[in-house]
Image (cartoon, rainbow, N blue to C red):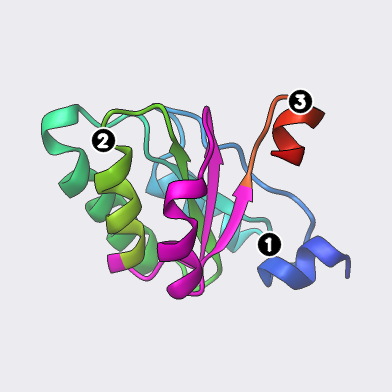
Amino acid sequence: MKTRVTELLGIEYPIIQGGMAWVAEHHLAAAVSEAGGFGLIGAASAPPEIVREEVREQIQAAKKETDKPFGVNLMLMNPEADEIAKVIVEEGVKVVTTGAGNPAKYMSMWKEAKIKVIPVVASVALAKL
């Protein structure tokens, strides 16, 4: 099935898994990607003191489990968002979805790294912003 979404993300079906905290770990993200959808690792569930290492480990584990596209979901209100944003770049993630805030402060860094950014917004007003 070809759609703009499948072509943009390099997937078979236009299905994007939610970046659900506590559920969207590397196992689920890799399985969704292997099945032809777009898997997401939820970066919101790691304890603050180890968030950088935990997100890195999740990304590396997903890479071992699938060679298909997957991404990371970053909740921007997370106090560790700055560190997670850097790990996403360092680990070569190709797509990031964001929620709970404005991703503007990370856009230059992510665009320079050729990361596709999919902001999830709650209203038309936020989308326009």
- For the point 88% across and 70% down, the residue is 2
- Front: mark 3 or 1: 3
Q: Which residue is mark 2?
A: 80
How crowded is the residue under tag 2: few (<14 C-alpha within 10 Å), some, or many (20+)?
A: many
Q: Is residue 5 visible?
A: yes
- The quadrant of the rendering that contains the N terminus is bottom right
Q: Earlier in the sequence, mark 3 or mark 2?
A: 2
Q: Across the whole image, how many numbered discs are drawn on residues?
A: 3
Secondary structure of residue under mark 2? loop
* Amino acid identity at mark 2: Glu
- For the point 78% across and 59% down, the residue is 13
Task: State the extent of the magenta-drawn residues as a range.
Answer: 90-118
Q: CA distance from mark 1 to mark 2?
A: 31 Å
Q: Which residue is mark 1?
A: 36
Left or right: 82 in relation to 93: left
* Amino acid identity at mark 3: Ser
Q: CA distance from mark 3 to mark 2?
A: 25 Å
In front of the other: 7 or 68: 7
Q: Earlier in the sequence, mark 3 or mark 1?
A: 1
The quarter of the picture where residue 113 lies is bottom left
Q: CA distance from mark 3 to mark 1?
A: 29 Å
Proximity of marks 3 and 2: CB atoms separated by less than 8 Å: no
49, above or below 88, in the image: above
67, above or below 18, in the image: below
In front of the other: 57 or 102: 102
123, above or below 63, in the image: above
- In x, y percent, where is residue 44? 37, 31
- For the point 39% across and 49% down, the residue is 26
Left or right: 108 in relation to 13: left
Q: Which residue is mark 3?
A: 123
